[in-house]
Amino acid sequence: MTALFHAHSGLRYLALLAAVLVIGYAGFGLTAQRPFDRAGRILGAVFVGLLDLQVLVGLLLVVGGTWYPALSGHLACMLGAVAVAHVTLAKNRRAQPPGWRLPLAGVLGALVLIVLGLLAIGRAPLTMTR
């Protein structure tokens, strides 16, 4: 369980890095009025994949016995963040032509929910403490 906790703790930095990359790339694409491209799709997929992995590890922690009441708010916000990211990026993939606004809004919306989820368990977003 300790290894899972450390994996869950460390994965958040990779997810945050992916979010920053998507925001930066989408912001650049939007301001430069460039068409949505393969790199934007890949960065979005990496972000969603890391969120999925983060949720999977978190659920394994819960199934393994790590539970306290504040986790219900944390879990709800994190599942919401994954849903927002999945839905907005999937809608963008099907849009003709795909653009930068939906990925940007999806990642920003997911980040807001992630911060709320961290606050639900009494943690500041970038601390290493348990």
Image: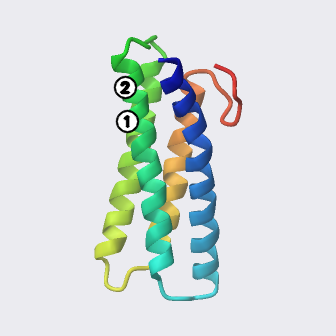
**Residue 90 screen position, x and y as percent:** 32, 65
**Residue 67 screen position, x and y as percent:** 43, 13
Q: Label 2 near label 1: C-beta < 8 Å?
A: yes
SS of the residue at dot 1?
helix
- Name which residue lies at 37% across and 25% down: 60
**Residue 107 screen position, x and y as percent:** 51, 57
Q: Which residue is the extreme one toward the front? A: 3
| Amino acid type at mark 2 | Leu
Of the numbered discs in the image, which one, if any, rests on residue 60?
2
| Amino acid type at mark 1 | Leu
- The quarter of the picture where residue 10 lies is top right
Q: Residues within 10 Å of mark 2 (few under 14, many from 20)?
A: some
Q: Which residue is mark 1?
A: 56
25 vs 105, left or right, is right
- Name which residue lies at 28% across and 75% down: 94
Determine whether 128 is above or below 15 in the image: above
